[in-house]
Amino acid sequence: MIMAQIIGGIGTTHVPAIGKAIAEKKHDDPYWKPFFKGFDFVHYWLARTKPDVAVVFYNDHGLNFFLDKLPTFAIGAANEYGSEDEGWGIPVSRPVPGDAALSWHLINALVADEFDLTMCQEMLIDHAVTIPMALIWPGPSWPVRIVPIEINTVQHPLPTLARCFKLGRAIGRALESYQHDLRVVVVGTGGLSHQLDGARAGFINKPFDELCLDKIVGEPEALTRYSIHEWVEQSGSQGVEFLNWMAMRGAMTGRVSELNRNYHIPISNTAAATVVYDNQKAAERKAA
Ligand SMILES: [Fe+2]
């Protein structure tokens, strides 16, 4: 039977300053080069694997949701996502095509699986989607459709790491029950350690970031033992964007291996990580 296939995952930071650097073509600037070089492997891998769809776990920064109404989890169900994210000198992104039919499959499967997502038939995407898209697919047109899934990393109480991992698991199961010939890549954006405000503004924790990048591949459950407050202590108040990475990792239900990792400090005041994971199902391993 023809089913959708989750080919792997990509994790990347989404710092707004990257959008300005892309617009100003600073790829070879000494400050930016070590960061942008981290995407060479991403482009190489995508040229070989050619996904049709990207499921993007991200957090909205006040463009589509504000503090007055902020869902813990929300999903786009549109055939196109516009952006009006004009802060930090970023040019407004061209719209990104969606896959409403797949979105509705995921919504139906997830609600049946006891994950009650806010359904958005109209949704604006901010830099947490558009910058990763521009980094991952830098060409003049988007070669993939997206399903954006928002996770609240902004207003406490936040969902736990365990909950976001389970959300990813439910998305993974739902994707693999979709009877269409689709190749899917899952993307988690944000992080890693950073703190924008308060006495610890500028806080970065390289040893903890490295521990996260090590554990998330083969032992993601080990990371789910941290409480949100412990995570803020270790990773900074905006380091909780790692929740998006936990969901991305959860969505990969096969044998996961790290194909590439780039870790660079700092981009703006953030520890920037770029990773590519392979997701291989048991049946494929047997056939190989
Ligand atoms: Fe962010």
Image: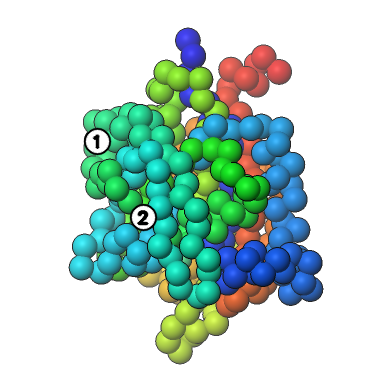
Q: CA distance from mark 2 to mark 1?
A: 23 Å
Quarter occupied by the C terminus: top right
Q: Residues within 10 Å of mark 2 (few under 14, many from 20)?
A: many
Q: Secondary structure at mark 2?
A: loop
Residue 111, label in figure: 1
Residue 132, image quadrant: bottom right
Which residue in the structure is indicated by mark 2? Answer: 124
Of all residues, the one furthest to the bottom in this rendering is 199
Q: Residue at x 40, y 43 (%)?
A: 80
Q: Position of residue 276 (x, y in %)?
A: 64, 46
Q: Is residue 191 visible in this depiction of the protein?
A: no
The kind of residue tagged 1 is Val
Q: Indicate whether 132 appears above or below 15.
A: above
The kind of residue tagged 2 is Leu
Q: Indicate whether 183 appears above or below 159.
A: above
Residue 40, label in figure: none
Q: Are marks 2 and 1 in contact (CB under 8 Å)?
A: no
